[in-house]
Image: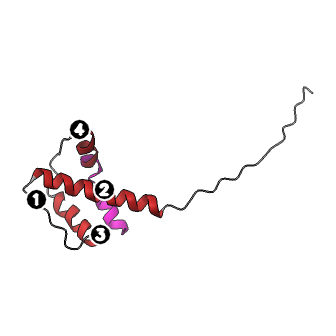
Amino acid sequence: MLPHNKQSLERFRNHYNAWVKDACLYSMDGGENDVLRIIREEWDPVHHVDLWCGSCRAKMLVYAFEMMDKEATQAAPPVETTVVKIKLNNPAE
């Protein structure tokens, strides 16, 4: 995902969280167009949404964040853990 698209989408993370948690969709003050642009650039060039439809905008928001979060988890390199044993000197012994 392009960094500027990720940054633009993250501006609406609180809208997504509010929808998922409380089923409340707040006004995005025109941000719907940005979200739609990002979806078209990143995942689906022919994606269509009726911006006058509240549930359609909510579905679009959920789709965008699920795709972004899915990409982020797939792109993360596996974490390698190394265990180091250390012998401590105990002066009481």
Residue at the spot of label 4: 22
**CA–CA distance between discs 4 and 3?**
27 Å
The span from disc 2 to disc 3 (Cα, nearest Å) is 12 Å
Nearest to N terminus: mark 2 or mark 3: 3
- In the image, is residue 22 part of the stretch drawn in magenta? no
Distance between mark 1 and mark 3 Cα atoms: 19 Å
Q: Quadrant of residue 26?
A: top left
Horizontal relation, residue 49 to residue 39: left or right: left
In this view, 15 is above or below 65: above
Marks 1 and 2, Cα distance to the nearest angstrom?
17 Å
Residue under pointer 2: 65
Residue named by callout 1: 51
Mark 1 and mark 4: Cα distance apart in space: 21 Å
The magenta stretch spans which residues? 1-15
**Does label 1 or label 4 sit earlier along the sequence?**
4
Disc on res. 1: none
The residue type indicated by label 1 comes to Leu
**Dot 3: element:** loop
Callout 1: 10 Å neighbours few (<14), some, many (20+)? some
Question: With respect to residue 37, does 53 lie above or below?
Answer: above
Q: Residue at x 18, y 41 (%)?
A: 24
Q: Position of residue 51 (x, y in %)?
A: 10, 59
Type of amino acid under label 4: Asp
Q: Amino acid at mark 2?
A: Phe
86 vs 6, left or right, is right
Name the residue located 44 percent from the left edge and 58 percent from the top edge.
Answer: 73
Judge whether 90 appears above or below 6 on screen.
above
Q: Are marks 4 and 2 in contact (CB under 8 Å)?
A: no
Judge left or right: residue 13 versus residue 85: left
Mark seen at residue 43: 3
The numbered mark, 4 or 2, whose residue comes first in the sequence reads 4
Reading the chain from its start, which is encountered first: label 1 or label 3?
Answer: 3
